[in-house]
């Protein structure tokens, strides 16, 4: 039972103006982004007809991770939640790592969505994209920068106005893929799933697992956590936030799975005849769904899909720009970054975070000049961020068992460690080349945040004892990946050794994950220290801190 004097964190300057529909669509517009435009093709090229199974497996995985976020967000409805839950549970040293990956994951999504926009726009404006190199051109780069500037400008609207814009865009984004599924199923050919004599699973289980991160499937599902990032602006978050997360993930799973079925089933024999692993049609490679619709005789659908290819990534880039500014707000509330990032204007918009989201997003336009080259790195960053949720959930169950939890994850003692194992498997399947790059990014993050905290006299205490497991976990995952079966890079030049046999590698990852999980639980912050960190972010007004606090009823 929750105690009346329960300590709760609260946010300052933000306004609760988003209802259940708005919260659900905030996550849904993040899920239905550029992923559906490209991942079904990439998955088919990697694993053939078995790609359908991968979408179902990924949906189950993401639902489990989402349920962890649902409990956390309902319990502590603060903006930038993914950057703040580990801070409360394990202190600043561990919190910095998860917080920085939350920011990296969010700030790079807008450039990815802009790449998708430009790639599809090249159908009408060919000089934006070089089909020979698979990269955007100088003109495409300028269009991308302009689009990111538009995302930033729209985000300066008050949340109630931004929410209305986002709801309209998301209704479109959901309706178009559903219509595409219905239309393409009229051309369904079941033999496409085993075309070319390669069978349903030409890559076997190894291909299936590798394709989860490499094809963009996991990336496509990312975004359900947007509710947690915007929790400080959701009305009645204890009720609306968990529901929004669960509804958005279930809807996304159904849409994505059926899109894969419709895409493969509608491929003309001229495209799929030699097998799904050997699709070479340049039109299909450049714009998968639009090309298949055109080849299937639905020219009107092809044009509609190309229009949606502008709107769908734009909506996702728009909401991730919002989320990025809220994560930097949360990092400032943790006192990891300068307090200027916690400043809001009269409309409740963290304007400094918005400007930096635009500027830092531009940096990621430089070394990754294509959609696919960014996806793998960001997928791994996403999973590292997501792995903080089951750890925090289990820690909170031990630290504050009496806290109010509007949603409780059933069988959390079992499901939380399973969710952590799954997150680590996804990291491992991303490949060693991706993991070592993330290691470098993490070191940069600790240096930057360390400098900022050194200059802040009110910084939180450095809880080294509660984070002793963190470097062991990260280095250990790197070593296992180095010795394992997944390179994540060019097949011709793997950087991993492959010494750990297939299947044994996954057993080792699972066992290592359990060791780290229970080690983290044994060293989590004591209850008093955890509540001290929460109290440092508390509100002087108890009504602001209560999960049910809301303004006047408002649709959306």
Image (cartoon, rainbow, N blue to C red):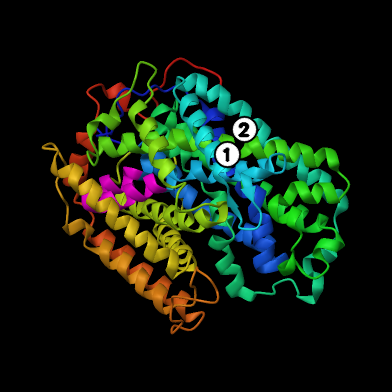
* On screen, residue 339 above or below 65: above
Name the residue that disc number 1 marks.
28
Q: Which of 181 and 510 is in front in this view?
A: 181
Assign the N terminus to one quadrant of the image.
Answer: top left
Count of labels in the image: 2
Magenta residue span: 83-104
Residue 304: x, y in percent? 76, 36
Dominant SS type (magenta): helix
Q: In this view, does 214 lie to the left or right of 421?
A: right
Q: Is residue 462 left or right of residue 72?
A: left
* Residue 2 painted magenta: no
Can residue 74 be spotted in the picture? no
Name the residue that disc number 2 marks.
170
Between the C-alphas of marks 1 and 2, the distance is 7 Å
* Residue 100 painted magenta: yes
Crowd rating for badge 2 (residues with CA inside 10 Å; few <14, some 14–19, many 20+):
many
Residue 27: x, y in percent? 53, 38
Q: Is residue 489 left or right of residue 440?
A: right
* On screen, residue 553 above or below 240: above
Q: Are marks 1 and 2 in contact (CB under 8 Å)?
A: yes
Occupied quadrant, residue 491: bottom right
Q: Is mark 1 on a helix, strand or loop?
A: helix
Residue 232: x, y in percent? 38, 30
| Residue at the image point whose x is 56% and y is 36% from the top | 143
Q: Which of 191 and 111 is in front in this view?
A: 111
Can residue 357 be spotted in the picture? yes
Q: Which of 527 and 23 is in front in this view?
A: 23
């Amino acid at each position: 039972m929750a105690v009346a004097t329960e300590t709760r964190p609260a946010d300052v300057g933000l306004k609760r103006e988003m209802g259940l529909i708005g919260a659900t669509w905030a996550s849904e517009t993040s899920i239905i982004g550029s992923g559906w435009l490209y991942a079904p093709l990439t998955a088919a090229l990697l694993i053939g007809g078995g790609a359908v199974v991968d979408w179902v497996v990924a949906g189950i995985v993401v639902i489990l991770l989402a349920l962890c976020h649902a409990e956390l967000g309902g319990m502590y409805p603060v903006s930038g939640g993914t950057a703040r839950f580990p801070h409360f549970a394990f202190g600043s040293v561990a919190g910095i790592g998860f917080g920085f990956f939350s920011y990296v994951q969010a700030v790079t999504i807008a450039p990815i969505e802009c790449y998708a926009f430009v790639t599809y726009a090249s159908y009408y404006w060919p000089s934006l994209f070089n089909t020979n190199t698979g990269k955007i051109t100088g003109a495409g780069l300028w269009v991308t920068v302009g689009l990111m500037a538009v995302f930033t400008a729209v985000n300066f609207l008050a949340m109630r106005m931004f929410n209305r814009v986002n709801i309209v865009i998301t209704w479109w984004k959901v309706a178009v893929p559903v219509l595409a599924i219905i239309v393409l199923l009229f051309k369904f050919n079941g033999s496409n799933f085993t075309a070319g004599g390669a069978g349903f699973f030409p890559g076997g289980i190894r291909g299936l697992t590798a394709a989860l991160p490499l094809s963009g499937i996991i990336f496509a599902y990312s975004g359900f956590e947007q509710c947690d990032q915007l929790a400080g602006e959701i009305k009645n978050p204890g009720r609306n936030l968990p529901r929004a997360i669960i509804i958005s993930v279930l809807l996304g799973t159904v849409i994505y799975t059926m899109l894969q079925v419709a895409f493969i089933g509608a491929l003309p024999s001229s495209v799929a005849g030699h097998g799904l692993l050997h699709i070479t049609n340049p039109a299909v490679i450049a714009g998968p769904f639009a090309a298949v619709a055109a080849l299937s005789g639905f020219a009107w659908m092809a044009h509609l899909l190309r229009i949606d290819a502008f709107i769908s990534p734009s909506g996702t880039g728009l909401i991730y720009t919002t989320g990025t500014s809220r994560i930097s707000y949360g990092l400032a509330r943790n006192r990891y970054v300068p307090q200027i990032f916690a400043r809001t204007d009269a409309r409740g918009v963290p304007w400094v975070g918005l400007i930096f989201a635009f500027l830092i997003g531009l940096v990621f336009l430089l070394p990754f000049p294509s959609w696919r080259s960014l996806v793998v790195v960001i997928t791994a960053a996403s999973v590292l961020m997501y792995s903080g949720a089951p750890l925090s959930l289990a820690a909170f169950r031990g630290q504050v068992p009496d806290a109010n939890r509007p949603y409780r994850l059933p069988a959390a003692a079992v499901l939380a460690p399973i969710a952590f194992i799954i997150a680590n498997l996804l990291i491992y399947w991303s490949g060693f080349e991706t993991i070592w790059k993330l290691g470098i990014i993490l070191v940069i993050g600790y240096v930057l945040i360390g400098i900022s905290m050194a200059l802040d006299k009110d910084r939180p205490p450095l809880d080294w004892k509660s984070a002793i497991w963190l470097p062991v976990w990260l280095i250990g995952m790197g070593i296992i990946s180095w010795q394992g079966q997944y390179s994540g890079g060019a097949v011709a030049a793997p950087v991993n050794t492959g010494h750990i046999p297939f299947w044994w590698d996954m057993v080792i990852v699972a066992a290592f994950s359990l060791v780290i999980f229970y080690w983290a639980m044994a060293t989590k912050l004591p209850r008093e220290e955890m509540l001290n960190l929460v109290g440092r972010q508390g509100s002087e007004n108890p009504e602001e801190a209560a999960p049910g606090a809301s303004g006047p009823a408002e649709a959306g």
